[in-house]
Image: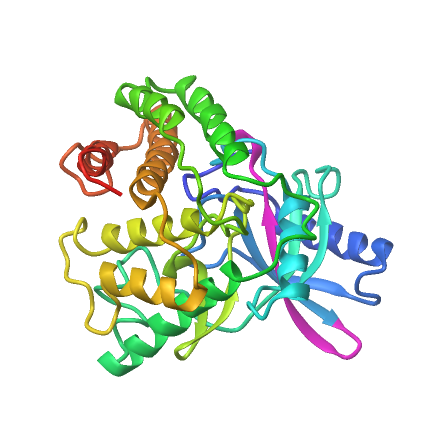
Amino acid sequence: MVVDLLRQTDRDLGDLQRRLTEWLRTEGILDGCVVEGARHPHGAGTANETLLVDCRTPVGVRGLVVRLTVPGAAAYLDVDLERQAAALRWVAAHTDVPVPAVCGVEPTGTVLGAPFLLLERVAGVVPPDYPNYNVSGPVAELDEEGRRALWRNALDTVCALHRADTAGVGFLEPGLEPLVRYWHRMADWVGERTPLGPLADVRDWLERNLPTGTPRGLSWGDARLGNMMFAGTRCVAVLDWEMVSLGGPMVDLAWWLMFDRNHSTDAGVARLAGLGTREETIDRWRGRTGLPLVGLRRHEVFALFQLSLLRAGAFADRTRAGLPVPTDDDPRSVRRLLDRIEERLSGTD
């Protein structure tokens, strides 16, 4: 099967529709359903292969999203769809944070040739990474007041997740340590495809400087505007839960700040008026969560290390496919992320 760098395959969509229809009927998920209209969405993420389908039932048409793993071109190590489904169901049941409803999960790969997660499709728009949402797209098209409302609603949604009582969460191992161990294994996995170079030293530094005393709780794992769906200025869905953990809210705050800078200062473009600055984001997060700000610098180094590994692995895949990769002076390069790491290492918490 041919796989492109957007994690799209050349699979037979007609065959997928037939197989998915049969599975839905066998599992009793949507009786009388006929799946049709399978297509790849424009601008989908790169961690999975994503397909949109229409499910025709006796009472109307329901829109669904099929997220398939791509074992031959995976972005993450040991992708666990059942854990993602459990997280989505838990968030829906225990918080007011909007997430897509889980229709089903098939972890074996025997139905469609790859494990998949089936979600209810939510109507809305997602701020794009390419082109940068600070340059064009639905966020840029809002006026300053609208962007301010969107930013506040988005960050408040993340804060609501961070206030959740996770005492009853049994499907995740508590603490930051399991998440750090996972990324150490990710480093070994990426290192099998491309030399780690200075990232090996960063891994050693993180092992010696693991943040302690940080707030406990749920971490979405990929907290950024580009993983949120909006209807107007209101968040209607929080997407992409591959890296959910109990590593704590500081993990998400650091990730949010990193991607905000990636899409503004590091990209060489101005942050749109109305979108909160770093200082405003930190202040609002502290005020809305009531949590202490502990170990932010070390969490930011950790976030940059994670993104560096993801990009190093993706660029190794591109090189093997004979495709170009960003040069060191490109804002998307690993070299630029390493420069950011050096900057944070020389700072203070």
List x then y, in percent, for residue 138. Answer: 33, 72
Is 245 above or below relative to 28?
Answer: above
Can you say which quadrant of the picture contains the C terminus?
top left
Q: Is residue 152 left or right of residue 93?
A: left
Q: Is residue 188 left or right of residue 100?
A: left
Name the residue: 19% across, 39% down. 347
Residue 309, picture quadrant = top left
List x then y, in percent, for residue 330. Answer: 17, 40
Name the residue: 83% across, 67% down. 32
Here the colouring is: rainbow
Question: Is residue 62 found inside the magenta-colored segment of the image?
Answer: yes
Name the residue: 70% across, 53% down. 168
Is 145 above or below relative to 306?
Answer: below
Q: Tell me the chief SS of the magenta region.
A: strand
Is 239 above or below relative to 74?
Answer: below
How many labels, in total? 0
Name the residue: 48% across, 42% down. 7
List x then y, in percent, for residue 249. Answer: 46, 52
Residue 79, picture quadrant = top right
Question: Is residue 54 found inside the magenta-colored segment of the image?
Answer: no
List x then y, in percent, for residue 123. Answer: 52, 73
Is 335 above or below relative to 103?
Answer: above
Can you say which quadrant of the picture contains the N terminus?
top right
Region rendered in magenta: 57-72
Residue 284, picture quadrant = bottom left
